[in-house]
Amino acid sequence: MARSPTYDPAAGMGGLSISEGEGVSSKAARFPVRPSPGTIGRRANLFANHFFARFKPELELHHYDVSLTPEVTSRGVRRAVIRELVIQYQHTELGRKLPVYDGNKSLYTAGPLPFQNKTFDIQLPEEDEGPRAGGAPARGREERRFKVVIKIAARVDLFRLDEYLAGRLPEAPQEALQALDIVLREQATIRDVPVARSFFHSELGTRQLGGGLVAWRGYYQSLRPTQSGLSLNLDTLSTAFYEPVDLVEFTSRMLNRNVRQVRAPLNDADRVRLKKTLVGVKVEVTHRGDERRNFPIEGRQTSVVDYFRQQYNYEIKFDWLPAVTVGQQKSSYLPFEVCVIVPGQRYSKKLSDKQVTELLRATCQRPHERMGEIQKIVDRNNYNNDPYVKEFGLHVNPKMANFDGRILNPPKLVFGRNAEVMPVMGTWNMAGKQLVTGSQCPTWVLINFSPARWVDPGTANRFATALANTCNQLGIDEHVASLLRTRLAFPLHLADAISRADVTQQMARQPATGTVAADRALRDPDQLASTLRGVCDDLRSRNGKMPDLLVCILPDIGPFYGDIKKVCETEIGVLSQCVLSKHVGKCQAQYLSNVALKINLKLGGRNFLMADEYAKKLPMVSDKPTIVFGAGLTHAHPGEESASMSAVVGSVDWPYVNRYQCRVSSQPARLEILQDLYTCKRTAGGQMQHGGVIRELLIAFYQATGQKPARVIFFRDGVSEGQFQHVLMYELDAIRRACASLEAGYQPTVTWIVVQKRHHLRLFPGDQNKDRSGNTVPGTVVDTTVCHVREWDYYLCSHAGIQGTSRPTHYHVLADENGFSTDQLQNITNSLCYTYQRCTRSVSIGQRRDPAPFGRILDSLCFIFRRRICCLFLSPSIPPVYYAGLGAFRAKFYLEGGESSGGESSSGISATGGAPSARTSTGRSSRAPAPMPPLKENIKKTMFFC
């Protein structure tokens, strides 16, 4: 039985046991050690983008501390200083050693330097920018002087790393790993543009993104310990850079109009956009040729136009454009036309929807293409001829890792009337089948918010008929027969609030159609809310109850989707289903079927079940009451400080694991722990008031099943390796406290698994076990070779590829009190990926930068807003985590309304130009989040987030 953290209820946050015995550090929670590898499934030969490395354990590395005076924050400047120092002193003061430098405080050498502590004086040339404001004296060209102090910090023992890789030490010697990783990165840092752990260069490939931006190809690289020894993980990617053009041309591209010809000043909105985009960008001036010295205005007031005329005999051509302010301490003012953006500057701000689409397309590669490009980059980097790699005695195998994995069988699925289906390549067909449990929908309303020229009343009625027929064919009872005999009815008297659009309402047995306008309702959230309330109140007064469902036809992608969801779910208390007008006229059977699947879920039905689940024979689930949780966070875009959204879903239909309830909350920006899993506060009367989402979901489970969960399986999204211990200790303790608050001594056994999507391992089929896209087949699992040296983790690719290279999901088990075997846990994980109820295919982690899979899959799922693909949570994952992601994404609408831009999850792609930003520490933010509007009680009990 795998080891797991244990809990003492009296110990509070210290409830996790801390091992002090042999094999585990006293400073870390005891994560389960890997059991024996799995055995079920058929063999599959695989390649992975890992390149095994050798090192010399007998070589003693030396770590030196580096300090610069004056201090500088720029890593580029610090690196330039150290490079200059090495050029000047390598063969003298440095004793012919070739050091590597991390750009911060650490410098490493292979063997000792001939000193313990030494100070160097280094000079770097600096170039000034342009004419300074306020008559400041010119600095011209000058030498920047730095005092560099290098002193011994520690010796790095590579023998301990060798012992760890051989399984004879419990913890990885992090400094040894860090030193060797820096060695492999040193040459790339000099040659390419470093961004976090990635490198980019225009020679690797570019693609226009529009708006003055261009995508550069690059690669991620990281040295990792694996079961097979050290391995260099290398993957391709793209990110956005500024185009190296003059600012006039950049402005034209960004604003999508030729400002050279439009002789008019920029309006305030364009100025603000331009300022946000260009702040911090480096430019070089062209009005002085190769000479880039600055000259003052010499104490008198003058315009930039006059100054350039008088000082440089230069006539500014575009004097209607603003001047750009350059410099950090003393500002200089330059006309746009003499400023050219310096090449190689990464764009780290939010991208537009169009730019995101282009960036995704730039990274979309078939598996064989990606594999080939990775191999070309390894050949280009030529690690074994790298002077730094040679200096430190490293050797990198230039060939990809090749090994055997396994392919797990899919679960058999059950539909209505006991029809059974065996998925093929992760997909199945609903043709001729009924849902296993159809829902009841006595009354529903179709509201058309599209202009009549797009969807006229007749088209809306035909869509209502087709959707109702599809629902009935699948087993959803909608009482449609009387709905279809529609007749003109009185107007809804909303014309004062809205203008020029159609609203068609359909009711069971009392149908009515009318024409009102919706344009203003869509532009104004208050008017939208008024419109929706008016429709519901009118139907309630005539029918005696609220409609069961609102189906809303929307004209296009836009913010009103979020406004509708917010109003319906937090203010009115009615379920809604949105569809795009472009699909309404087509009435395609597949689209209608997928909409019907979502409607059935929201109304309380089940679409399909696993056969073992249906027979109540699902291992480690059916034998005793088991609740499956999925949890995750979504954060604001980098640079923004709006609240983070957390969501937790829990299954509530044991002995099945099919229906989930969701709880959402807001918490301080970029806080990585789930803050509201359990809460406890003292009331004014002195009583302890217990709460939190885990407690709520445990109660919901009991209310739905009449049983208390005896087993908990908790899938946690988006925790990085460096946060494992902190997040596990806090959140497992919260789960324990929530359970104990319900009943004294109530402590179900817990298995706590991190689900990681932000990783760079790619699997490529090495034999004929591949799907039509060239990807690994669904069910491919790896738990050897490239996995953790001793801890329990595995990679599972359970979805079929569509376009681009599939990304397996990484599962890391941090606690297991249920005693899962490797085969049991891998099998249930793979099986759960076939229970995602919104589509007829298994899900896994999608390729986050490939647009076509998202565009096609999500579109077929009636995910009608393409710009929402920016949100990380739209990348598929195991269903509990996927559902939690949808819930967290929905919660952003509750706080921000329809203007929510998606943000980024703690594990997925953001709509920014750069690589994912590093997460803030798990400490609390100083900014308190805005209170979350509560969900209506009837909405809480549904799968409203689907």
Image (cartoon, rainbow, N blue to C red):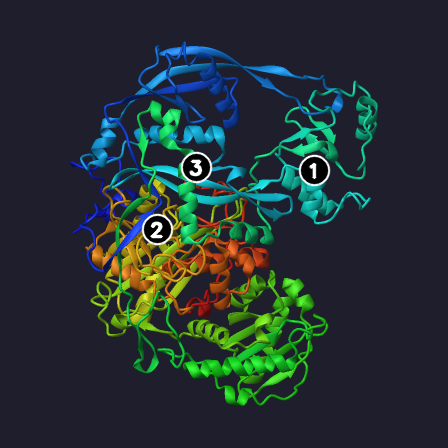
Task: Please provide percent x and percent y for residue 496.
Answer: 72, 72
Up-down relation of residue 800 to residue 265 (above or below): below
Up-down relation of residue 456 to residue 804 (above or below): below
Residue 395 visible? The answer is yes
Q: What's the CA distance linking mark 1 and mark 3?
A: 30 Å
Left or right side of 796 for 885:
right
Residue 745 quadrant: bottom left
Q: Which residue is mark 3?
A: 197
Which residue is at 25% across, 40% downward? 228
Q: Which residue is mark 2?
A: 763
Residue in the foreground of this view, choosing between 907 and 291 = 291
Q: Nearer the viewer, mark 2 or mark 1?
A: 2
Amino acid type of disc 2? Leu
Which residue is at 55% across, 60% downward? 866
Q: What's the CA distance linking mark 3 and mark 2?
A: 21 Å
Q: Which residue is mark 1?
A: 247
Task: Please provide percent x and percent y for residue 81.
Answer: 50, 19
